[in-house]
Amino acid sequence: MSTELKIIGTNVTRPDAHDKVTGGKNYPVNFSLPGMLHTGILRSPYAHAKIVSIDTTEAEKLPGVKAVLTPDDVPQRPFTPVYFVPAQARSMVQDFVIMSDTVRWVGQPVAAVAAVSPEVAAQALELIDVEYDELPAVFDPEEAVGEGAPRLWEHAEDNIAKHAKFEAGDLEAGFAEADHVFEGCYQTQRVHTCYMEPRVCVAEADSRGRIKILSSMQHSFGLREKLAFALGIPESDVNVIKPDYIGGGFGGKLDIGFIEPIASLLALKTGRPVRAQHTRAEDFISTTRNPIKVYLKTGVKNDGTFTARYIKSVLDCGAHATHGSEVIMVHGLYGTFFPWNCPNQTWEGYTVYTNNMIGGGYRGYGAPQGCFAVESQNDEICEKLGLDPIEFRLKNTWREGDPHPVLPGHELNTYRLQECLEQGAERSGFRNRGKAGSGSGIRKRGIGFACHPLWVSGCVGFPDIYEHAGATVKLNRDGTADVVSACVDIGSGQNTMLTQVVAEELSLAADRVRLVYADTDTAPFDAPTHASRATYSAGTATRAAAVAAKKRLFQAAAAVMEANADDLELRDGKVAVKGDPSTAVPMTDIIERAESPFIQTTEDGPAPTTLAEKGTIIGTASMAPPSNPSPCAAEFVEVEVDTETGEVDVLNVVYAHDIGRVFHPKSAEGQVEGGFQQGMGYALMEHIVFDPDTGACLTGDFLDYKMPTAVEMPRNIESIFIESIEPTGPFGAKSLSEMCIIVPAPAIANAIYNAVGVRVKDLPITPEKILRELGRL
Amino acid sequence: MTLNRLQHYHLPDSGNAVIDLLEKYPDEAMIVAGGTFVHGLAARGLVSHVEALIDVSRLGLNFVRTDEGRLWIGATTTFRELLESPEIAGQPLFGAIRDALSWPPPQVRNAATIGGCVAAACPFFDMPVALLALAGAVSAQGRSGVREVPLQEFYDGLFENTLKADEFVIDMSVPLPTGRAASAFAKLETNANDLAILNAAVLVSAGSGGTCDMARVFVGGGVGETPVRSRAAEEVLIGNALTAEHFVAAGEAARNEIDPLDDHRASAAYRKAMTAVYVQRVLEKAAARLRA
Amino acid sequence: MKELLTIEVNGERHEVAIEKSDSLARVLRDRLGMTATKRGCDTGGCGCCTVLVDGRAVYSCMTFAKAVGERKVTTVEGLVREGELDPLQQAFIDADAVQCGYCTCGMMMAARQLLDENPDPSEDEIRKGISGNLCRCTGYSKIVDAIQLAAAAGRPA
């Protein structure tokens, strides 16, 4: 199959690269409309309080202020703001309103203004007088479930937003069978996706109250659905314009923000277009990766075979459940329970309300937290029992052809974890590493690895999650193709991937395919750009649309060529009877003919054509993908630790991933390298910190929230892609993006252990924590 | 957007004009030059009272020169201008200055000024620690003329200096010791665009026998509201050979002398431990320069 | 109260009404409609707003517009000369250094200063040269590749 591919698997130029290097005019942040107003949002300084009164008189008097919004102006319709589930999905918690009379976290919107400039809007906020009645607050999820803790919501006794449990086998018997039992507690921290483009939107209402909105979101249809619900208007009264591209997302733009409904309400109120944009400090308190504390108890035989595992996960969702009720499930299913083949297991998960900021989606969606716990403990087990860490992983995971551990009726068609582990070990020099802490000198080196045996290519099989996708492909008379797709390019190359799919299917050069304007009025539904799904899911549907267009092309060609449509093939831009190149006709001739007048005047007089060949060559598809194949990956990391300061230098990284099919080698490497930057930040430095007394965010900009720059990043990151060619995937594809961020943290933790012989079980692994473990503090 | 009260942006062209403006807005004015610190303060709501900015970059205060036995650095000299200045190039004495200026990214080096960095009295800045080690002084101009303030008397707490209401910084100066001396600076940070979690600078000189006859040891970056001098470390060094064992001992002495801040970036205990390590390491660096 | 500012951007002089507190980024983006210069954090932490002032990279979000004076501002809009991309722009495309691309313009301006002053930088010098610019997509590897590629291609004639 691969020998026939001409576009897939090559480094075609990204269709939006030229635009971006010359200024990137089409980012949502650059969108403006004549007469546009600007929004300011007043936010709560208290972590928990009842609003007694809001006086907006002075703000309304300020010249340039056009409208003020308070909770009284906002429909009180609780919903879940997560784009990829229905607003009232039963698996989720509906506790979200745009503004309410109770504030539950520092930063919750209390009022908003629309003014002629951002400066006037900011001044107006200072003139709004809010009287609060402060309530007791709780910031630790384990305290929040305790007796006498302040309660956030009527509907949540003990502040538990969601409790879930999976069981398999007989846990007690499994532990009885074990030769050794390992217990540990692994804590992860709250981090931010740190997309570079702040969240922004522009909303406009027409004279009938219909909203048109452009936003920096990762999902057009989800925004339409949630915005309509929040405003209490029909979905068809919202049209979401898909941006050509956005400045990063990583899951951080998967919720409806406060800005979209606020801007829409202000647009309705003023009759003018309204823009709202986050400051970076507002971004830092809007959607984060939920901290999860994982209690992990594992029973193993002397040979390393798992006999039992008990896992308890406590997730801090903050003041609203939002993604928290789904993240905990994915964390349980794909982050801890099913990746590993253990006969007797119990997992319990708790999503707990606190007066912290809300969580959200972030690349990996519960798995980075789970993988850190499990792979840290796996390393401890191998170290203690003297087991070969690679054999140990292979003994306790899955094999190609096994039934899919989560999805009934599906198999692991393609599954090459062994190759990932072996090739990664080979390239990284893992087998030659020293014993833990055995190096000499102040700076000590170590190599460690982590793998993740099970993940997704989309959401087929998950309750309540949209997964279908669609596209329309139209062939133009000049031999180009236009693609209408609602799939948002968040930076990871969705536009490139969709063009490659269409170009490959229609034998066009990649630059002959264009992604064109799309909005929710005109494009078929597409699920969000999330869950490593775009290539597998949107790629499948877009390929189907291209196939439909090709079918239409063959119908027209059949009439012109006096052949049977089923006998035709498309190669190098020409339609020909299969096996007979002499019959080849350029596809542009067919397209032109299909769109030409029915009767044309020729040198020989009027010449009628046939009805069958008439009509634009166009194809549409809307469908769910056939399966949800699992990628798997392993990452090997070499670090150097300064044993006097605790500082960690990451020197080398080798990442091996069973990807199915590589579409674009450089982009694929880019996912690995960028994923490592985020994973390394997660492992070593990133942390949203709050004032323990007030709940206010202390890390509201990049002076305080630290992520790796080019200087801290390792010089060598090697990507190995195992192309297993998944039979259900478009051109054999599975998925890539999220795995790249799931494995770095435990790989780094295990490498640090190998370097200095101490293990830090709560992220981030700061120099200070290492020094404390080394007994030097 | 927390420069909401800002009404005036002045670009005075003389020192007297600056003083006039300082008197006109006794509590509402702020001096700026490179502007690299204002927005960080603004985002934290710390300059919401400011109604007037007084930009001193048109006063001709960007110069670096040596005379009267001192190195003079004009207040609006940028990090980059000083770093590239032949006056400090290659000399072991100014090692600490070169070290400190090499840390920030280009955008900061190109814009930030030495005077702004010193006058801001931010405990996490680098140049103040380097200049303190070099026994620097500040020249402040006010209605009654220019006065010299030793840097050690300049700082008066978090973001506080001892300038009078009508005064502003016009230059910094550093004495040139008669003997051979070397300095060094180092910084602990999380990424390459960070404020110091801890920093340290030392100045040492040695007589002909290799015995240390002068030492100045300063630690900053959150070890206190202002940088801290470790006289205990200096005492360990003076009269002894500049060798590894004394550097370790000096580090320990400094560690025992300080009482650092505890904040979300580092605990006091960690800052104490790092004080020992960093004092030792900068001493090694300075001694190497002295030997070179 | 607005006032009139004269400013030279990419060789062209503009007269523009500004607020006193306007940063250079605000003037470029919102007063002159030159949106290549991005707004990412407003506190000099991300580097998306990097432009050249007299050939030197600065954070335009922290540069007060009034302080620019007679100095010459260069933005990404000024990199294209006679329809030809700057070697850096071409190299960013060729090396696949552009993912979401939001950091790209600021990153290229930091790199432009670096290459103008040091046409043959080492990898460490490149990394230090862009240490004031954050990227969340690429892990910087392809960006370093792109700058090396542009260095190899040399300056435009």
Image (cartoon, rainbow, N blue to C red):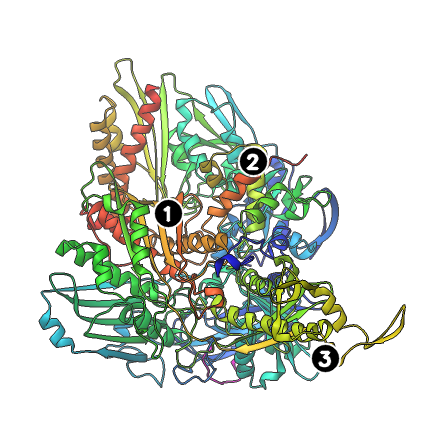
Which residue in the structure is indicated by mark 2?
A: C152
Which residue in the structure is indicated by mark 1?
A: B190
Chain ID for label 2? C
Secondary structure mostly seen in the magenta stretch: loop
Where is residue A565? Give x, y as percent. 64, 75
Residue drawn at point x = 90 percent, y = 68 percent? A603
Gap between marks 1 and 3, in whole Å? 68 Å
Residue drawn at point x = 21 percent, y = 55 percent? A389
Nearer the camera: disc 1 or disc 3:
3
Q: Is residue A395 visible?
A: yes
Range drawn in magenta? A71-81
Q: Secondary structure at mark 1?
A: loop
**Eyeballing the image, is A367 above or below B138?**
below
Where is residue A327? Give x, y as percent. 37, 72
Where is residue B192? Give x, y as percent. 42, 44
- Residue A612: give its label: 3
Please name whichever residue, A345 or A125, is drawn nearer the observer in this view of the structure.
Answer: A345
Q: Secondary structure at mark 2?
A: helix
Gap between marks 2 and 3, in whole Å? 56 Å
Callouts 2 and 1 in the same chain: no
Question: Could you tell me the amino acid type at mark 2?
Answer: Ala
Gap between marks 2 and 1, in whole Å? 32 Å
Where is residue A303? Give x, y as percent. 13, 61
Q: Are marks 2 and 1 in contact (CB under 8 Å)?
A: no
* Residue A419 falls inside the magenta stretch: no
Question: Could you tell me the amino acid type at mark 3?
Answer: Ala
